[in-house]
Amino acid sequence: MSVLKDKQVIALGERDGVSGPAIAAIAKAAGASVAFTATECFV
Amino acid sequence: MDLESQEKILRLSQEHDPKDLVVLIGAPDPEAAEITAETVVSGDPAFAGALAGTQLGLSVYHVLDDDVKAEVPDDVWDDQIGVMADVLEAEDLVKAVVSMRQA
């Protein structure tokens, strides 16, 4: 079963890892919609 | 997780069928990945935000999970994730999130 296609994705990126916009871009390319994007700084 | 993000995720889970929502995590270390995953599955462990005591049970993956990568065209993957996939310990990150997904 597809993980991303036709799903609403919540992209929780992180400054020192993979950013929110990068996650959103790959989700869209996989056929998902992006419902929320954030790039957090974990402390 | 940021309090603002928790409020937004709670609202999205009320607006959409939770089965249609997928959370992708880009955290660079397993501890952060696990806490973020725990927050969207069984609630904020710090009891600080809107998701405290809220078991959303959302579907959650680390972005470096092979199941995610398999669905992304190679050129987009290389452009957007590229070097981070080599720098980060993908196996440990994926394991940390899977442990929460199956909890």
Image (cartoon, rainbow, N blue to C red):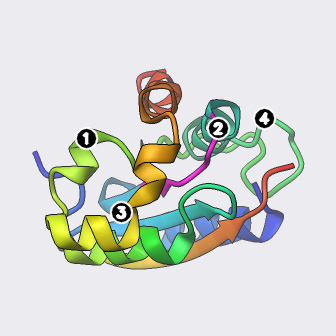
From the viewer's side, name the closer residue of A34 and B52: A34
Q: Earlier in the sequence, mark 1 or mark 4?
A: 4
Question: Which amino acid lies under the numbered mark 4 shown in the image of this protein?
Answer: Pro
Mark 3 vs mark 4, foreground winner is 4
Disc 2: which residue: B29
Q: Earlier in the sequence, mark 3 or mark 2?
A: 3
Disc 1: which residue: B66
Give the chain of mark 1. B
Total numbered labels placed on residues in the image: 4
Measured as percent of width and height from the top left, residue B15 is found at 47, 74
Please check whether the numbered discs 1 and 4 fall on a single chain: yes
Disc 4: which residue: B45
Question: Which amino acid lies under the numbered mark 2 shown in the image of this protein?
Answer: Asp
Measured as percent of width and height from the top left, residue B56 is found at 54, 46
Q: Is residue B97 magenta?
A: no
Mark 4 vs mark 2, foreground winner is 2
Give the chain of mark 3. B
B32 displayed left or right of B9:
right
Question: Which amino acid lies under the numbered mark 1 shown in the image of this protein?
Answer: Asp
Stretch of the chain drawn in magenta = B23-29
From the viewer's side, name the closer residue of B47 and B25: B25
Can you tell which quarter of the image residue A5 is in?
bottom left
CA gap between label 4 and label 2 equals 17 Å
